Image: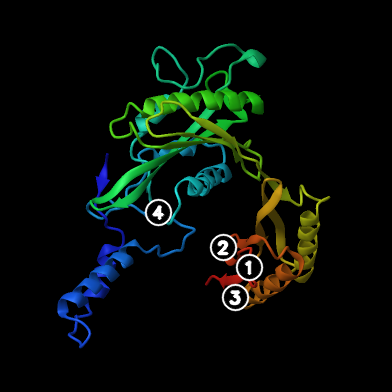
Amino acid sequence: MKRKKLLIFASLSLFFLGACRPEVTETGSPEEASEEVEEDESAAVSRNQLGDSYYRPALDEEGHYLTSQNRGITLNLNSGINLNLFEKDLIRLSQEQYPTSEYYIQEGQYLPENMVRSWIGRKSEENPEGLNPAEEGEGDDRVPRYLNSILELDFFKESEDGLDLSGISIGLALNTVDYYTAVQFGPTLEQEVSEGKMLEEGKNIANEIVRRIREIEGLEEIPVMISLYKQAPKDDLAGGVHIARGNSNSGSTVIDSWEDINEDRKIYPLAGQSSAEGNAFANFQSEVEAFFPNISGITGRAHYINERLDSLTINIMTQFYGETEMISYTQYLKQSAATYLPADLAIEIVVESSAGVEAFLEKGPADAEFYSHVFD
């Protein structure tokens, strides 16, 4: 089993603790004071600086952050929205399996890029490791590619000797539409994949990946979670969602159990007009558009979990004329959002112009007010 020295924030903690020289008091000896310092140091090293919603990073023995061995693979996803949500949601789902209070995270180090590229390719004589079916058929009879991308995340737990690898999450991005060209330099064609077939093939691919993972040195007994991500089509502004996840317990060569994930994403105002939250967004949109004449558009990405709205991300495109104007607009956004949008909802509001992000507002479901920042 792979071990790593515990180096999380160690140099920073030692810097501050080293400035405090132990003193002899009536209630303690220098040795006792030293023990207290060591205990404080351990707590400082283990503290999560960003809160329990985030993992602490696992560093290598030289104190360096390691980037993914197959970082470029996810660039095959068909939109920036899918690229962002694929990883973001995999981390969120992993928190239920590997709590942030107990585990450290590291970008995948066991599935190198050349291996993953062969896996996501079609099976052939030249590529016997391909997990997509062999090229076969034409037109409506063509066999599509189901697997688009693979993402690996590694999780570690603290032990007396450092950090022990204690779990792996694998995300499989699956195609709802397979984009391809029939001839070189020809037009891009589309082939739709039904959700039922996508889910069936995704589970079969997941079992084969687990079998291969067990053949990698050091991963024979490591728990593995695999999540299936339904990639949205290129022109879908809402992005995809994970639709199922399964666990392979220690040493198992298959997924021992599967769980359906009931999530959805919608774009306001294109969807949701008949719902209470959709009407709330429409009222907010009307209010802020009436106040500020330089708005190019307002859209909201609504994330539903188990058919209940869980979070809302609002993007506002505007022309920018000055800092005073943007400060006034941000203040009005805080007031309007608090008035019209649901109070028990996680909300982010991003104001952008051609120059970049101008302002940002955020609140959690339990927060009474929005945090806001206007960028220089």
Disc number placed over residue 102 in the picture, else none: 4
- Identify the residue position indicated by label 2 in the image: 357
SS for callout 2: strand
Q: Is 256 left or right of 239, judged from the image as shown?
A: left
Query: Which of pointers 4 and 2 lies earlier in the amino acid sequence?
Result: 4
Query: Which of pointers 3 and 4 lies earlier in the amino acid sequence?
Result: 4
- Identify the residue position indicated by label 3 in the image: 323
Q: Answer few, some or many: residues within 10 Å of disc 4's Cα (few below 14, many 20 plus, some between 14 and 19).
A: some
Q: Are marks 2 and 1 in contact (CB under 8 Å)?
A: no
Label 2 to label 3: alpha-carbon separation = 13 Å
Label 3 to label 4: alpha-carbon separation = 44 Å
Label 1 to label 4: alpha-carbon separation = 45 Å
Label 4 to label 2: alpha-carbon separation = 35 Å
- Residue 249, picture quadrant: top left
Residue at the (27%, 68%) spot, across then down: 39
Residue at the (27%, 63%) spot, across then down: 10
Query: Which of pointers 1 and 4 lies earlier in the amino acid sequence?
Result: 4
Q: Answer few, some or many: residues within 10 Å of disc 1's Cα (few below 14, many 20 plus, some between 14 and 19).
A: some
Query: Which of pointers 2 and 1 lies earlier in the amino acid sequence?
Result: 1
Name the amino acid, label 4.
Glu
Mark 2 or 1: in front is 2
- Residue 183, picture quadrant: top right
Q: Answer few, some or many: residues within 10 Å of disc 2's Cα (few below 14, many 20 plus, some between 14 and 19).
A: some
Measured from the top left, where is residue 136 in percent x and y? 55, 12
Q: Is residue 267 visible?
A: yes
Name the amino acid, label 3.
Glu
SS for callout 3: helix
Q: Answer few, some or many: residues within 10 Å of disc 3's Cα (few below 14, many 20 plus, some between 14 and 19).
A: few
SS for callout 1: loop
Label 2 to label 1: alpha-carbon separation = 10 Å
Name the amino acid, label 2.
Val
